[in-house]
Amino acid sequence: MERAELARLLGGTLAPQTSRRILISEAEPRKFMMAFAQAAAGEAEVFLCDPKWGAVERSQVDTLLRAPIPEAMLCAAGKGWLMIPTGGTNGQVRFARHDTATISAAVKGFTQHFELPQVNAAGVLPLHHVSGFMAWMRCTMTGGTYRPLDWKALEEGTLPVLPVKVHGWVLSLVPTQLERLLRQDAAIEWLRKFRVIFVGGGPTWSELLDKAASLRLPLSLGYGMTESAAMMAGSRTADFLAGTRSCGTMMPHVTAQISSEGAISIYGESLFRGYYPQWRTPGEFVTQDGGYRDRNGHLYITGRRDTVIISGGEKVDPAAVEDVLRGSGELPQVVVLGVPDAEWGQVVIAAYPESPPPKLKKVAEVMNRLLSPAKRPKLFVPLAKWPVNEEGKVNRAEVAHLAEHIFARRPG
């Protein structure tokens, strides 16, 4: 599919574009969709941006946009014009280059894997995020219906009646959203009406999955990333209900290899063209994920091979958060870490020396101004003993042990 064809499907009309870059930072789904349709109709590079980014993230984007790019490499042959944000492997803002070729390859593989010739999706994930964006693209490219929903309204019990479709409806959720919907009897009945409920974007705890299975919800556990244009493996709902907790098998548009150390490498037509402003040599992409396959070829993800915290589906770079906290002037020594949490998968906390006591109100003012909500520590843990080695360097493993113990014993 060419870019012009995508624009036509979206209803975009060609209009003069004075900039070679267009940034879309829009929280309201309908406005985002209109802005993207118009941007796709032109020739400018298009950047999808999180409207909740704070000053730190916006500064990182500004730095990327100032980076020089050889003129000959700009949107070469219609490739790499769409920049989808990702925390990458270190939590820093990066943009993965995509285009209609990578997106359509991912859509084709998805529809073949799930035997869905037409996709109709209810959308609750933000459209600037690859999972929300690709849900929309699957509908657009297969002639289906995409209906954006208000997550807050769903959480409060306003559950829309979706019109009957020959191929049914699908829904994508992060684990935290699924957990919150399962608190409502009416929401459980509403979820049962979907053909498939895709769950991904972060660690999913076994108690949640077992509860969903006991309620006979048609879940599919998936594996994907921004670099692959979202899902590249997904389990069958029948397998999930039968007790399998794998990510299923790889979709036809992507192949994967797993090294003897468990490192996952992927190949395929949906893979990104490179991290903006660079370009990537086509071929193997070595992920930071670890995993293995069972004898049936089902993929299991064992976790990240780096230190990024994933909380509620968002990637958090501990070092970047620590820099902001230190910049408040109140926490010269601080360690940010992620601890297991039943609601968020992981929750971000910050540990610091008990003495001298910091002014946490000032710290909160700084981080609320500079960090997006997912990156703000939910708990600050004072440690009476601050473990350091002979060189004065903090023992992060010991801090993590002490902080996790305190976190586990907290009231409520």
Image: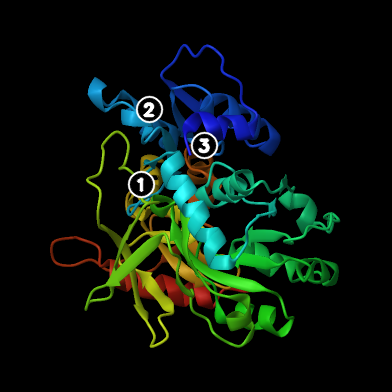
User: What is the spatial separation of the Cα atoms under label 1 and label 3, in whole angstroms?
Assistant: 32 Å
Amino acid identity at mark 2? Asp
Name which quarter of the figure residue 73 lies in.
Answer: top left
Instruction: Name the one closer to the observer, 254 or 61.
Output: 254
Mark closest to the chain's N terminus, 2 or 1 = 2
Instruction: Name the one closer to the observer, 201 or 345.
Output: 201
Name which quarter of the figure residue 384 lies in.
Answer: bottom left
Q: Residues within 10 Å of mark 3 (few under 14, many from 20)?
A: few
Amino acid identity at mark 1? Phe
Q: Which residue is mark 3?
A: 369
Point out the frontmost of discs 2 and 1: 1
Point out the frontmost of discs 2 and 3: 2
Q: Are marks 1 and 3 in contact (CB under 8 Å)?
A: no
At horizontal 67% and vertical 82% (from top left) the residue drawn is 213
74 w.r.t. 378: above or below: above
> Where is residue 137 drawn, in percent x and y?
58, 45
User: What is the spatial separation of the Cα atoms under label 2 and label 3, in whole angstroms?
Assistant: 17 Å
Instruction: Name the one closer to the observer, 53 or 379.
Output: 53
Q: Which residue is mark 2?
A: 62
Q: Which residue is mark 1?
A: 272
Amino acid identity at mark 3? Arg
Mark closest to the chain's N terminus, 2 or 3 = 2
Point out the frontmost of discs 1 and 3: 1
